[in-house]
Image (cartoon, grey):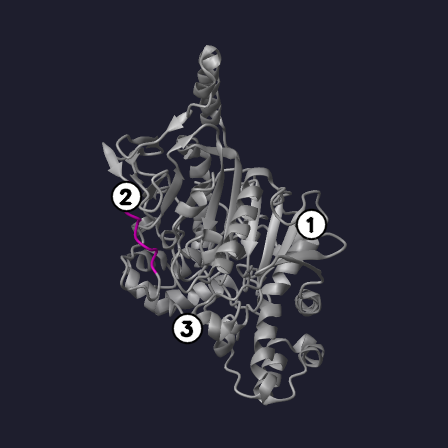
């Protein structure tokens, strides 16, 4: 269910109906001219691909209605395990879309229902709308191993005149397993990017159905954080995603392992198919015909065979779960594609928190200055001397800061700036940010403006209670205003907001904190180390 084009017949119908309403109302009193063109109710079903669904009014805002647990593809179970997503299976009667679907299979989260039957999405929208609204489609993070679309409340964003969509996609070994037999089975001789295909299927569903919820299929913004941000950056180069979205926001872009080929290593990672063969062996699948055994194994057995959660992107210990260069969904080395301006030409916002590395400090296993030097020499041998000089870690009292800084630059700031540098070569504008507001939480006290610290601010879910302050709510209001303005127009700027300059030759950005500040050269030197390292890997291939 991967396609290149869509039609907007539903949008035409929406606009035609609206035109008729306006024409009929021409001789009516002024107050009747703005009558809603679309009214949604918890009592009346909505027709979508597969059948009819019925939602419920939001508990926190009676002007917003939510539809949760809506299937956008067939259950990828049994023979459909490790297959591209298939069309939704139709249902009879009205389906009550009031409960989120199960989480996709993952380690942890045992207090929530998990299943391979997990391809469901959620929609929040205004009960009444007078014109098509911009659509924001959220891609959750979690290192491609964890998380779900149902972990977010879309009510506050939907209250700002957008239609908000979240969804699940297959994770870890279920979403990103490549294997030689799977590649042979595929008409495209490709495997491993099933999670990305799920994202494309969700965006297809949006194109086909979002008008029914008051959304404009020609103004779709994808946005995501961490692995979700990496997914945004990847979808920008996926041919099958062209035309399915029109703006992009990538928060804390995370891309380790995404340049692996099916049979060729990338950035010293194990090739994607080799990793898959190792997992097939762990499942005792016969080498001659492994797929029946692999597909017959229980979900728990597959998770155990993959040892989900035991790999490390920080030490390049397999398994790594991420998109791979399969020559079809991801046609070529992503950084090369960006460098050659092969990404979709559309407006982009990207950025990072003030200290991305702090949350991952313990995973590096660095206990002292000698460990730090050994870590840099082992992971980044081609730039080790430059990196050690730059971070200048000579004593224990700066060790934690150096670890944070190294991870921040090499895992997050580097990809963000590489994308921006490449995007400056295409006509569409780009904007860069740093999120420096330290949340008033225990994690904020321990890790500062850490990875994912911006999420309650972006979604406006901090509420009116302590520990959140008026300053936090002010920052949230500003960032939500930029995000929704960008979704509406392709530019985050409007008259009542501080001016956000574009990222161009002047290398400008803004910082989200108690006061919005402009600056230049955000993490320029550290990201340059990332560029040198990545270039050295490509020279060696």
Please tell me which residue lies in front, 463 or 487: 463
Q: Is residue 359 left or right of residue 125?
A: right
Q: Which mark is residue 98?
A: 2
Dot 3 or dot 2, earlier in sequence: 2
Dot 2 or dot 1, earlier in sequence: 2
Q: Is 103 inside the magenta-drawn segment?
A: yes
The reply to whether residue 317 is visible in this rendering is no
Q: Which mark is residue 390?
A: none
Q: Which residues are magenta?
A: 97-105
Secondary-structure class at tag 1: loop
**Residue at mark 1 to residue at mark 3: CA–CA distance:** 40 Å
From this viewpoint, which residue is outermost toward the left? 93
Residue beneath disc 1: 502
The reply to whether residue 393 is visible in this rendering is yes
Please tell me which residue lies in front, 152 or 360: 152
Residue beneath disc 3: 310
**Residue at mark 2 to residue at mark 1: CA–CA distance:** 41 Å
Using a 10 Å C-alpha cutoff, classify the residue at mark 3 as few (fewer than 14 neighbours), some (14 to 19) or many (20 or more): few
Q: Pointer 1 and pointer 3: residues touching (CB < 8 Å)? A: no
Q: Position of residue 91 (x, y in %)?
A: 26, 35
Q: Is residue 99 left or right of residue 149?
A: left
Q: Position of residue 423 (x, y in %)?
A: 68, 50
Magenta stretch mostly in which secondary structure? loop
Secondary-structure class at tag 2: loop
Using a 10 Å C-alpha cutoff, classify the residue at mark 2 as few (fewer than 14 neighbours), some (14 to 19) or many (20 or more): some
């Amino acid at each position: 269910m991967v396609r290149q084009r869509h039609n907007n017949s539903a949008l035409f119908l929406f606009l035609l109906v609206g035109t008729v309403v306006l024409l009929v109302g021409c001789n009516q009193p002024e107050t009747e001219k703005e009558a809603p063109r679309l009214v949604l109710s918890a009592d009346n079903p909505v027709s979508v691909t597969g059948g009819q669904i019925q939602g419920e009014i939001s508990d926190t805002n009676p002007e917003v209605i939510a539809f949760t647990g809506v299937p956008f593809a067939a259950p990828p179970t049994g023979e459909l395990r490790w297959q591209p997503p298939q069309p939704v299976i139709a249902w009879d009667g009205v389906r009550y879309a009031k409960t989120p679907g199960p989480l996709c299979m993952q380690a942890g989260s045992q207090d929530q229902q998990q299943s391979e039957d997990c391809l469901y999405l959620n929609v929040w929208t205004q009960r009444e709308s007078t014109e098509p609204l911009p659509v924001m489609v959220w891609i959750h993070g979690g290192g491609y191993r964890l998380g779900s679309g149902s972990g977010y409340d879309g009510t506050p964003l939907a209250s700002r005149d957008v239609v908000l969509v979240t969804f699940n996609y297959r994770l870890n070994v279920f979403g990103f397993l490549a294997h030689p037999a799977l590649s042979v089975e595929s008409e495209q001789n490709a495997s491993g990017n099933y999670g990305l295909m799920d994202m494309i299927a969700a965006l297809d569903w949006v194109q086909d159905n979002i008008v029914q919820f008051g959304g404009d299929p020609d103004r779709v913004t994808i946005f995501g954080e961490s692995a979700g941000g990496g997914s945004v950056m990847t979808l920008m180069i996926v041919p099958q995603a062209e035309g399915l979205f029109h703006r992009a926001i990538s928060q804390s872009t995370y891309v380790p392992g995404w340049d692996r080929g099916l049979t060729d290593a990338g950035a010293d990672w194990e090739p994607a198919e080799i990793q898959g063969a190792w997992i097939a062996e762990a499942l005792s699948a016969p080498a001659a015909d492994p797929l029946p055994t692999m597909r017959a194994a229980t979900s728990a057995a597959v998770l155990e065979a993959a040892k989900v959660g035991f790999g490390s992107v920080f030490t390049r210990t397999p398994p790594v779960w991420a998109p791979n260069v399969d020559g079809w969904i991801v046609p070529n080395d992503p950084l090369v594609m960006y460098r050659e301006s092969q990404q979709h030409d559309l407006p982009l916002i990207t950025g990072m928190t003030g200290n991305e590395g702090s949350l991952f400090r313990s995973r590096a296993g660095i206990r002292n200055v000698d460990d730090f030097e050994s870590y840099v020499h082992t992971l980044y041998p081609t730039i080790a001397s430059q990196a050690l000089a730059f971070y200048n870690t000579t004593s224990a009292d700066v060790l934690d800061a150096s670890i944070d800084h190294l991870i921040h630059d090499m895992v997050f700031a580097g990809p963000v700036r590489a994308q921006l540098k490449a995007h400056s070569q295409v006509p569409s504008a780009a904007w860069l940010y740093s999120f420096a507001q330290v949340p008033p939480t225990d994690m904020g006290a321990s890790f500062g403006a850490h990875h994912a610290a911006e999420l309650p601010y972006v979604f406006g879910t901090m509420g009116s209670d302590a520990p959140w302050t008026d300053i936090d709510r002010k920052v949230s209001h500003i960032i939500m205003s930029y995000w929704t303005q960008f979704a509406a127009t392709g530019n985050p700027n409007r008259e009542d907001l501080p001016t956000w300059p574009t990222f161009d030759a002047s290398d400008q950005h803004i910082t989200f904190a108690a006061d919005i500040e402009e600056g230049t050269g955000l993490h320029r030197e550290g990201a340059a180390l990332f560029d040198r390292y990545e270039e050295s890997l490509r020279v060696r291939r």
